[in-house]
Amino acid sequence: MKKQIKSKWQPMNPDLVMYNGKIVTVDNDFSITEAIAIKDNRIYGVGLSSDMKNLSGEKTELIDLNGATVLPGINDAHCHLNGFGLERPPFLVDLAYPLIKSLEDIRKTTAAKIAEVGIGKWISGWGWDRGFLAEFKDKPQSWPTRYDIDPVSPDNPVVYSEFSGHTCLVNSKVLEIAGINRDTPNPENGIIQRDASGEPTGILFETAAGMMRELVPPPTEAERKTGILNAMAELNSLGITCVTEPGLNADQIRIYTNLYNQGKFTLRVNCMVMGGPSLNAVKQILDNVGTCTGFGNEWLRISGLKLLADGIPPSKTAFMYEDYLGGGHGKLLVDGKTDEERYDMLISMIKYANARDFQVGIHVTGDRGIDACVDGYIAALAEHPWDARHYTIHTDYVTLKCMKRMAKHNIGANIQSAIKWTIGNLMVGIVGEKRAAYHWPLKSLFDAGVRVSNSSDASVTYPDWRQGVESAVLRKDKATGNVLGAYECISVEQAIRSYTINGAWQDHQDNVRGSIEVGKLADFTIIGDDILSIDPNRIHEIPVLYTIVDGKIVYKNLKY
Ligand SMILES: [Zn+2]
């Protein structure tokens, strides 16, 4: 692909020329230039303002960027878009900071929602975080209970997911409907938390939390579509042009396809098919899907298979070599009775998907879990080699040794720097200071040559890539401002790569997007400050001016 202006024999008249800007191309040399010409949905020229303006004809629209910075369209490489749409008002109660700062706020919000929808109706909410509830300031390791919300919800079942999605708080009404009491055993890979006397507290972890969410009557088809379109519009307003949507079932892919067919897309969506916890489950799902990585087009495509290998560090369910403070080291969350059986099961699942030409992305956070996944990828590729670009999702505690293996075998790392910002200090009480500092070793990953893609994991964090860049560069904790592991800070340039070309690489799309180069898709994020020179503490404040997808403006900031 050529970077320079096309020669004279080619047709002129680009549709749009944007000039007088700072164009951060994110090409191999990270070169910076002034102007872009667009024809149809592609980049037609990149270069100096005078040269690009010279290309324009009668029908060319000219936009003076007035010094604004243009980035390749921002790519959120792990974003539960359809979930995010349904996990926000008007569908769900927003329980996230800064709206919610205490249990008292949760009670008030719950009472208001019940007044709105009526007695007896199910109430769902998303996003509470102990780290930001006033009552837990001095006891960050304890949990809220059903008795904290029962007084305002005696007759409405209430299911409130924690920001991580791995934990739920429910009220007594829900336990009553679910028939959960002191005699109910924990489900496989889930925990019903109990107090000293053995009574369920209303806090449920992992599969037990999922069971609570499944009790809530599902949204209608119209609500699901509205949720996706709301989410697309909100992401466009943040400058996002593309997402990887992890863990969809066949019906969710159908809804996306339906919206695409209606011409409603304003954001590119790479779908990961959701796998299951055993080889049989994976076989059944992939055989039913009947296609493989790459099916679709540049707007909507099947990118890979999502698997789940362990839990998350804050819940002490990540599979670690070294114990958590207070004991325990997690385990693989696939079928099997022993660590060895579960390891073998995971490897067989990866091998099967790889042989079916499916890229595999695995949710895995603990160092021991990550090693197991990478073992599986390397073994699978040895049997059936192809440009799979398998990757680990989250990758929290990847070891230095493992990074080298990942780089050697072209295995990517998907990370979430904004989760580090959210839970940074909380981790000190889970794994101690040293491991809390090492948590998400981004600089080491880049130094090892691993392709690092960045993402929000929305709704785990709000899908604001600016906060993600800032957090990757500063590694500050949201609640305290403490810097955790300064030695793993990356540069703004590296953080931008993680949100553009590296995400495109992850999804086998770096040949058509991820950088501003001639011939690539015309996806741009135009921002009002120079992200490369601004004080990094202010990156999250940079205004998004325009978002352009496929050559069309999908968001324009009316304040500028
Ligand atoms: Zn996720």
Image: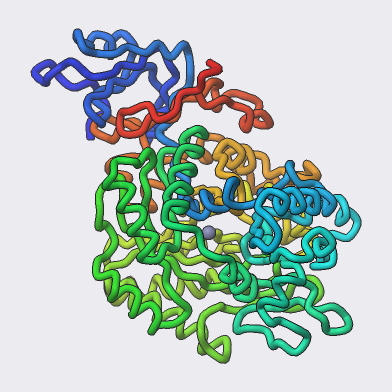
Quadrant of the drawing holding the N terminus: top left
330 to 122, vertically: above or below: below
Residue 501: percent from the left, percent from the top?
40, 42
Say whether residue 169 is left or right of residue 140. Answer: left
Color encoding of the figure: rainbow
Residue 173 found in image quarter = bottom right
Q: Nearer the viewer, residue 377 or 364?
A: 364
**Residue plotted at (76% across, 46% down):** 100
Residue 387 found in image quarter = bottom left
**Residue plotted at (73% across, 58% down):** 436
Let me know if residue 539 appears in the view.
yes
Say whether residue 12 is left or right of residue 112. Answer: left
Q: Nearer the viewer, residue 107 or 516?
A: 107
163 to 543, vertically: above or below: below
Residue 515 found in image quarter = top left
Let me know if residue 443 appears in the view.
no
Residue 394: percent from the left, percent from the top?
55, 59
Residue 494: percent from the left, percent from the top?
51, 40
Residue 361: percent from the left, percent from the top?
43, 63
